Amino acid sequence: MEVNDMLATNNMTISLGASVTIPVTQDVTVIVPKELKPAAGNITVSLGKPITVPVLVPVEHKSTPTCINDPFMVDGECYKVTAMSFGNPHGAVFVDDVDSVDVQKLGSALGTHVLFPKGASIVFIQVLDKENIKVRLWQKGQPETDFTPEAACVAGTAAMMCQKILLNRTNVSFGGNTFIVNWDRGNSEVTLTGSENLLSVEGSCANR
C-alpha cells in the first residue's frame, strides 16, 4: 500500500474515517481509509495531552498545580492567563471582543512577560456562545498568525478547562476557517478536526 501521500509527523495521529493502521517509523503512525487515496476534505489529528504543569510549560507559577486564569500585569492592566502547551508554550486569554484586541502589541507584551521564562505564543479567545469560540493568535517570534493547530487546541481546551464551554468539544473560528476541538476528559487526549489542506504536514505541525 502506498503511504507517501499520507500525512504524518512525530507524535501525531491522523484519522481519515474507516481505517487501517500503517506504522511508518517508530514514532509515526498513519491511519488511512481502506481506499488508497481518500478524497480531499476534513481530517482529524491528535495532538495528545495538554501540558499544564507550570514547570513543563514552562511558566512561573507556584501557588497551584496549574496556571489557570493567573494574573499577568502589563502596563498597569491585569490580564488573566491560562498557560498550556502541546509542545510549545502558549498563554490563553479570554476577551470580550477579539476583533478589537491589538494582537501585536498585547500579544508581544504577554508573550515576552517575565512569567514566561522561554516566551510563549498568546491566544486571544472570545466565547461566542455555548459551543463556539473565535480566536486570534500572536505567535512567538512572529506577528499575528492566521492559524496553527496547536494554538487552536490550546484555545479550545482552555475554553473547556475554564468552563467557558461546558461540552467536551467546541467549534473554533480561526483565521477565517472553522475547526472542531475535542477534549476527551477520560484520557485527556485532544483532537483537532479541520480542512486537510490546513492540517497538512507543511502547515500544521503541532511542534511548530
Image (cartoon, grey):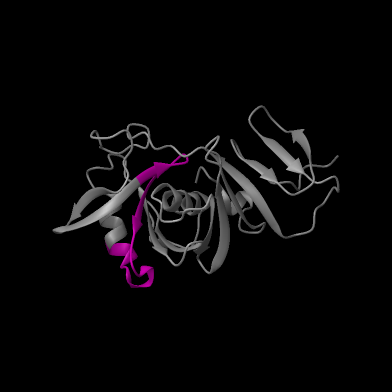
Using the rendered image of the protein, determine whether residue 147 is visible from the camera's viewpoint: yes
In the current view of this chain or complex, which residue is farthest to the top? 26
- Horizontal side of residue 187 vs 120, given as left or right: right
In percent of width and height, residue 120 lies at: 35, 47
Q: Pick the residue in front: 125 or 11.
A: 125
In the current view of this chain or complex, which residue is farthest to the left? 76
Residue at screen point 22% across, 49% down: 71
Q: Is residue 86 magenta?
A: yes
Instruction: Tell me which corner region of the image, top left, top right, bottom left or bottom right, holds residue 187.
Output: top right
In percent of width and height, residue 184 lies at: 56, 42
Question: In the rendered image, which quarter contains the N terminus?
Answer: top right
Using the rendered image of the protein, determine whether residue 8 is visible from the camera's viewpoint: no
The relative height of residue 26 versus residue 170 in the rendered view (above or below) is: above
- Horizontal side of residue 150 vs 71, given as left or right: right
Instruction: Tell me which corner region of the image, top left, top right, bottom left or bottom right, holds residue 76.
Output: bottom left
Total numbered labels placed on residues in the image: 0
- Horizontal side of residue 150 vs 70, given as left or right: right
Residue at screen point 46% across, 48% down: 157
The relative height of residue 23 versus residue 181 in the rendered view (above or below) is: above
The relative height of residue 131 versus residue 5 in the rendered view (above or below) is: below
Instruction: Tell me which corner region of the image, top left, top right, bottom left or bottom right, holds residue 8.
Output: top right
In percent of width and height, residue 182 lies at: 56, 49
Q: Is residue 148 magenta?
A: no
- Horizontal side of residue 88 vs 108, given as left or right: right
Magenta span: 83-105
Residue at screen point 46% across, 52% down: 151
Residue at screen point 56% across, 66% down: 177
In percent of width and height, residue 83 lies at: 35, 44
Q: Pick the residue in front: 186 or 34.
A: 186
